[in-house]
Structure formats: C-alpha cells, structure tokens
Image: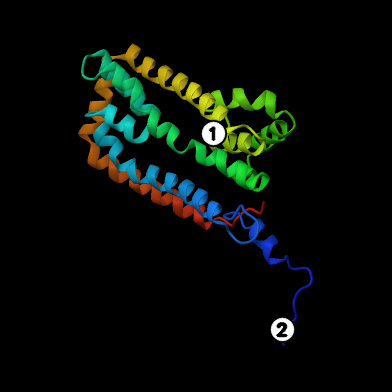
Amino acid sequence: MSVENPDAPAPAERARNEPRLPWEGKARRVDILCWAGITFSGIYALALLPLVPSLLGRNPVLLEFLRGSTTSMVTAGAFAKVGEASLLLAILAPFPIMMLFDPLYWWAGKLWGRPVIDMFAGDRPRAQRWVDKVENNAGRIGPPAVILAYVLPIPSALIYAAVGWTGMRLRLFLVLDLIGTALWVGLNVGLGYIIGQSAVDVAKAISRYALILTVALVVVVIVLQVRRSSRPPNPL
C-alpha cells in the first residue's frame, strides 16, 4: 500500500511550479493559445536561421521581412546606399515580423502574472531587480521600457510580459511598441546607409560561403539546444 507524502505539493502547485507551465491548474483555451503562439515564435526564428547566410548578400530586404534581425537591417541600409535596394522598403520591411509576436508576451503577462515573469527573467539577477522595480513603479517605468526594449540589457519578452502583468492597456502597448520598433529600425538601417559599400562587400562575401555557414549555424543551434535541455529546470 502506497503512503502519500504529506509534504508533497498539490497537483495545482506542481503545475504552477513546473517552469514550462506558467498557469495554475488545468490549462484553459486561452492558456494553450498564448503558449502555442510563444512556442511558434521560437520555432519560427530557428527555422529561418539557415536562410541568413544566403539571403544576407543577395536580398537583405527579404531577410528583414522574414526575420527583422539587426544584421539584415544594417545590410539593407547599406544596399540602399549603393542603389541595390529601395531605402523605403528597407525601412518598412522589418516592421511586421518585429511586432508580430510582441502582443503575445504582453498577453502572457496579463494571463499568468508573476510566474511567467519569473520564467522569462530566469536566473538573471539584473532582470529580477528590474521586475521588482516595475512591480512598484509600473506607470513610470513601463512605458519608456517598452520604447527602449531593443537597447535595454533585459530580454524584450520580459519587458512586454511585465507591462501586461502590471496593467498596461493593449492599445498603449502597441503604440509604444511601434515607436520603439521605429527607432530601432531607423538606427540600424541608418547605420547601414552610412557604412555603405563596405557592409555590402561583407554581406556578399558571407553569401558566397552560404552553405558552409548554414551548416555551422545549424550545428551551433543543435549544440546549444542539447546543452540547454540537459540542464535541470530551475523552480519558479
């Protein structure tokens, strides 16, 4: 006959303490939808990683549209400087993908509160201190943090979730996110435009060795994922 451990956590508590399940108890439909969207965003980023070397020196504007990475924006600006791409397209292309998944993290903070905040913060002391400040000064810290999310030394997902948790309205979040994205895109495309031909030459050299670099990227991703999955989970 088995004897139940009186010190064992209840099922709801076990679910809450499981780092991959930020909600408490049985998952609702909204929990599944939000978590599936966040999971898809990670899979999408990894799936498109092999395209980076080949597109960087051939069609950086398309790479901007697909990934919105810093490298693609700088390169697109450089291509625009030498007349090989449209400057307007170089500026507009990254906006959809850069803002597509951000509301999901805001929604996660609104749905699950502190557990998902702690999950995104992980074991980063700086991030945990920042979360504590936001909790007490959300109205003052939250808006500028969303605008500066791309330059702050804190994961942007954590910032978006934190402002959702502390009550920022979705409409305000989207406006601030648009402003922050515009500043970041302008900075990177502008930098590439200033650099010009040198950045174009580097990008085209990378594309010439696209196959080798793609294989190297895939290997690095696999190694990192294996190492991450082998670590014991940290309790919330």
Name the mark on residue 156. Answer: 1
Q: Quadrant of residue 207?
A: top left
The answer to whether residue 124 is above or below residue 183 is below
Name the mark on residue 53. Answer: none
Residue located at (72% from left, 31% from top): 133
The answer to whether residue 98 is above or below residue 221 is above
- Locate residue 138, reporting x and y percent: 69, 29
Residue located at (29% from left, 16% from top): 87
Amino acid type, callout 2: Ser
- Locate residue 100, reporting x and y percent: 43, 36
- Locate residue 68, reporting x and y percent: 38, 31
Q: Is residue 121 left or right of residue 32?
A: right
Residue located at (48% from left, 25% from top): 178
Q: Is residue 140 left or right of residue 224?
A: right
The answer to whether residue 75 is above or below residue 154 is above
Q: Is residue 152 visible?
A: no
Secondary structure, mark 1, is helix
Q: CA gap, disc 1 to disc 2?
A: 47 Å
User: Which of the two labelled residues, at mark 1 and mark 2, occupies the earlier sequence position?
Assistant: 2
Residue beneath label 2, please? 2
Secondary structure, mark 2, is loop
